[in-house]
Image (tube, rainbow, N blue to C red):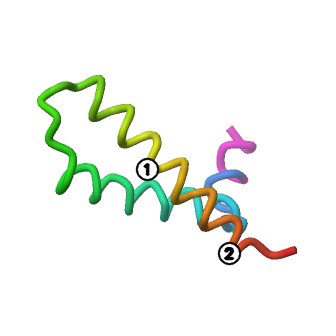
Protein backbone atom coordinates (compact mmCIF):
# COMPACT_ATOMS: atom_id res chain seq x y z
CA UNK A 1 0.00 0.00 0.00
CA UNK A 2 2.86 2.35 0.75
CA UNK A 3 4.28 1.82 -2.74
CA UNK A 4 0.95 2.82 -4.28
CA UNK A 5 0.91 6.04 -2.24
CA UNK A 6 4.46 6.77 -3.32
CA UNK A 7 3.64 6.28 -7.01
CA UNK A 8 0.42 8.30 -6.86
CA UNK A 9 2.04 11.07 -4.84
CA UNK A 10 5.09 11.45 -7.04
CA UNK A 11 5.41 14.01 -9.80
CA UNK A 12 5.22 12.96 -13.42
CA UNK A 13 8.42 12.82 -15.39
CA UNK A 14 8.61 14.49 -18.81
CA UNK A 15 8.01 11.29 -20.78
CA UNK A 16 4.88 10.42 -18.85
CA UNK A 17 3.51 13.96 -19.15
CA UNK A 18 4.09 13.91 -22.91
CA UNK A 19 2.40 10.50 -23.19
CA UNK A 20 -0.67 11.65 -21.23
CA UNK A 21 -0.93 14.88 -23.26
CA UNK A 22 -0.62 12.92 -26.52
CA UNK A 23 -3.36 10.55 -25.31
CA UNK A 24 -5.73 13.44 -24.63
CA UNK A 25 -5.03 15.13 -27.97
CA UNK A 26 -5.35 11.85 -29.88
CA UNK A 27 -8.68 11.17 -28.16
CA UNK A 28 -10.07 14.54 -29.25
CA UNK A 29 -8.80 14.07 -32.81
CA UNK A 30 -10.28 10.57 -33.02
CA UNK A 31 -13.60 11.68 -31.57
CA UNK A 32 -13.97 14.56 -34.02
CA UNK A 33 -12.46 13.18 -37.23
CA UNK A 34 -12.55 9.39 -37.36
CA UNK A 35 -15.95 8.15 -38.53
CA UNK A 36 -15.12 4.87 -40.27
CA UNK A 37 -18.24 3.03 -38.98
CA UNK A 38 -15.90 0.28 -37.81
CA UNK A 39 -14.70 -0.01 -34.22
CA UNK A 40 -11.55 -1.81 -35.31
CA UNK A 41 -10.54 0.80 -37.89
CA UNK A 42 -11.27 3.68 -35.52
CA UNK A 43 -9.26 2.01 -32.75
CA UNK A 44 -6.30 1.41 -35.05
CA UNK A 45 -6.45 5.02 -36.27
CA UNK A 46 -6.65 6.30 -32.68
CA UNK A 47 -3.65 4.22 -31.58
CA UNK A 48 -1.64 5.29 -34.63
CA UNK A 49 -2.46 8.93 -33.91
CA UNK A 50 -1.48 8.52 -30.26
CA UNK A 51 1.79 6.84 -31.22
CA UNK A 52 2.64 9.54 -33.77
CA UNK A 53 1.83 12.43 -31.43
CA UNK A 54 3.83 10.79 -28.62
CA UNK A 55 6.86 10.25 -30.87
CA UNK A 56 6.75 13.88 -32.07
CA UNK A 57 6.28 15.13 -28.51
CA UNK A 58 9.18 13.08 -27.19
CA UNK A 59 11.36 14.24 -30.08
CA UNK A 60 10.55 17.93 -29.54
CA UNK A 61 10.11 18.28 -25.77
CA UNK A 62 11.99 15.50 -24.06
CA UNK A 63 14.97 16.73 -22.05
CA UNK A 64 18.30 15.35 -23.19
Task: Name the main secondary structure of what is drawn in magenta.
Answer: helix
Q: Residue, x 69% and y 61% (percent of image)?
A: 15
In the rendered view of the protein, which quadrant contains the C terminus?
A: bottom right
Q: Which residue is mark 1?
A: 49
In the rendered view, tell whether residue 29 sits above or below residue 64: above
Question: Which is nearer the eye, 45 or 61?
Answer: 45
- Number of numbered callouts drawn: 2
Query: Where does the magenta region start and end?
Result: 1-6
- Tell me: 32 left or right of 52: left
Residue 13 as seen in the image, left or right of residue 33: right
Check the image and report above or below for 42 versus 18.
Answer: above
Q: Quadrant of residue 25?
A: bottom left
Query: As displayed, is residue 47 above or below residue 13?
Result: above
Q: Residues within 10 Å of mark 2 (few under 14, many from 20)?
A: few
Task: Spot the residue most to the right.
Answer: 64
Above or below residue 4? Residue 63 is below
What crowding class fits label 1: few (fewer than 14 Cα within 10 Å), some (14-19), or many (20 or more)?
some
Q: Nearer the viewer, residue 3 or 46?
A: 46
SS for dot 2: helix
Residue position for label 2 = 60
Disc 1 or 2, which lies upstream in sequence?
1
Q: x%, y% of residue 19? A: 57, 57
Residue 58 covered by magenta stretch = no
Question: Which residue appears at 17% of the width and 35% of the height?
Answer: 36
Amino acid sequence: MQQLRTVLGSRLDAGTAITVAALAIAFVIAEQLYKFHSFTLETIAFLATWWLLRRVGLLLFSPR
